[in-house]
Image: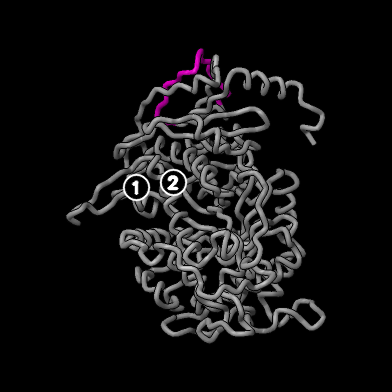
Amino acid sequence: MKCMIRYLQGGKPMRIIAAVLSLAAGFASCSGPQHPAAVVRTPNTAESYVRPYTADFGYGCNMGYYGSGWDDEHLASAISKAGGQTIRVTLPDQFLDKWGWQARQAAFDHHTINLGLRELVCFVGEPSAEHRDKTVYPGCREPSKLFANLYEPIWNADSTINPRNYYAAYIYRLTQTYGKHIRFWEVVNEPDFITDVSNKEWLDRAPNPAETTNTLAPIYHYIRTLRITWEVVKKYCPEDYVTPGGLGYAEYLDALLRFTDNPNNGAVTAQYPARGGAYFDVVDYHVYPSYYLRRRNLLHTSFNYLRNSDNAAAQLLRHKAQFEAVLHKHGFNGDTYPEKHFIVTETNISRRPAEWRYSSDEMQRNFGIKALVAAQKNGIRQVHFYSVAEATDAPQEPAGVSSADEFKLMGMYENMNRDRPGHEKLTPLGLGFKTTANLLAGWRYDAPRTAALKLPEEADGAAFRRGSQYVYVLWAKTQLDQQEAASVRYTFPAAWSVAGLERRAWDFGVSGVSTRMPGPTVLLDGAPAFFTPLEDAKKQLAARAYPHPKAEQ
C-alpha cells in the first residue's frame, strides 16, 4: 500500500502573485523595534526557551506523487541517491483514519533506518470527516478544515490525553507511532494560503476565515492547534521542534504574534495567557523566487527585470528578512524572548520560462547551489526543494511553458510520470544538488574564514570547514537580466600560502572529474565550483582510502 501524498500546484501562482504585490507595497509596519510594553514570559513555552539546533544543515526535498510505480519508498530512495539527507513528509489524519495507524511504519523505517535520512519534517492536519469541525464560518462556503473539539481540555486530570480533543489525540498517536522518525512538526501546510490580495490588512486586524483557504477558520483556532501541538510534542518528544506550516506572508506571522488561542477575539486571559509565538520555535517558510525578480520602475510605468540565479537566491534571504523583522518587532530577538530557528520547506524555480518569468537549465541549476550556500551563510537549518522530480517533459530550450506547467518543471529528476524506478534521470538541478550535498555534508559554514577570503564585489561564495580542512564554494556573480554568463579572476590570500587547488565543477557528483590547478589564482564563472587546497585534498583522499576506525561509527 502506498501513501498518496500530493502537493497542491493549482493554487500556488495566485498565492505568489499576492505575495509579490504585498512586498511591493512595502512592510513599513515592521520597521524598528516595537517590543511589548509589558514583557511576561510564559513558562514552558517558546517565550522562555528555544532548544538550540546542533544538527548539520539539512539538504532536503519534497516527495510529491507520481505514477509509473513510484511509491514513497522509491521516491525517498531517489532523493537519497541524489544526495538528499532529509525529506518532507505528511501523515494526514484522514489517511491514517482510513488505512490504519500502522500504514506508514514500513515506509518510515525505510526512510530513516534503511536510507539513513534524518531530521524529517512532517506536516500534520487534514482531519477525517468524523474529526472535522462542521462549522461554516462567516464568508465561507464550506466547513472549517481544522479539527472539531479543539477547545476540549487537552489533558485529563491524570495528565493523559483527553480523547475528546480529537486533534490532541491525533498528535499524541503520531508521537507514539512515528515520533522517533520526525524532528520538525509542521502544523498545517500553508495555513496562510489565500486567493486574493487583501493580506496587508492583517497588520491591523485578524485574517478572516474565508481569506485563509487552507483553514477556513478563525486564526485563534489555528493558534489553538499550535498550542496543542506544542504541549503534546514537547511532553512526548521534547527534543523536537514545532513550526507553522510553510508560511508565505510576514503579515500572517504578525497576526500569529498578536493574538492568543482565545476563541473570543484572541484576547489574553488567565486561561489563554500567551500569544501564538509561545507555541512554535521554528519559522518554516515557502518562497518561489521567480515571481519576485522584477520591480516597478520609478515612474511606475513598467518593470525593471533582474532574472538571474544570484537574484533568485537572494530572494530566499529577502523573505527571511521580512519574517525576522516581524519577530524582532514582537520581541523574539534573543533579548526579550528567544530567537527562533528557520527552515525552508518549499523553494525552486522552473527550468523553462513562463510568461515574464525567465529561466533555463543553467539558471535553475545555479540557483539551487547558490540557495544552499546562502541558506547556510544565513542560519537557515534546512532547505527542501520542490520537488523530487518533474511531472512533464521539458521542451527544448528556450521554449516557454504555461503557468500551470512551470511548477511541473521543478525537480531533481526528469519526468517521473514517464520514467519508471531504475530509469530516472537527474536534471541539471539534481546534478548540482548531488554535488553540493556530497561535497559539503558534514562540513560547517565558517564565517570568519569566509570574511578572510575578501571576495571582490563581482564574486560570491563561502568557506566550509571540517576539523582543520576547508572547502571553498566560489562563483562570479550573475548581474544581468536573463544572463548566467559572468567572469572574474580571484586570488586566495597570500598569507594562506596556497600552492595549488583542486577544482570540482557543479557536476562532480556524477562525473567524478576534478582539475588540479597550480597557484592561488582561479577564474570564476557564473556556475559555482568547489575548491580545495591541494594539501587538504591529499588528506581527504587518504582519509577515504584509510578511514579512521571511528569514522564509520
Q: Give the extent of the magenta segment.
A: 511-527
Q: Alpha carbon of mark 2 to alpha carbon of mark 1: how far?
A: 9 Å
- Give the residue displayed 45% in from the left and 55% down from the top: 321
Q: Judge left or right: residue 551 versus residue 122.
A: right
Q: Judge left or right: residue 2 versus residue 205.
A: right
Q: Position of residue 50 (x, y in %)?
A: 65, 60
Mark found first going from the N terminus, 2 or 1:
1
Q: Mark 2 is on which residue type? A: Leu
Along the viewing direction, whichever of 514 and 455 lies nearer the viewer: 455
Q: Which residue in the structure is indicated by mark 1?
A: 401
Q: Residue 295: within the magenta?
A: no
Q: Characterize the local packing of mark 1: few (<14), some (14-19) or many (20 or more) Cα atoms within 10 angstroms.
A: some
Q: Note whether 142 is above or below 425 in the view shown.
A: below
Q: Note whether 467 is above or below 108 in the view shown.
A: above
Q: Note whether 470 is above or below 187 in the view shown.
A: above
Q: Which residue in the structure is indicated by mark 2?
A: 409
- Give the residue displayed 49% in from the left and 29% down from the top: 453
Q: Judge left or right: residue 176 versus residue 129.
A: right
Q: Position of residue 272 (x, y in %)?
A: 61, 81
Name the disc covering residue 449, or none.
Answer: none
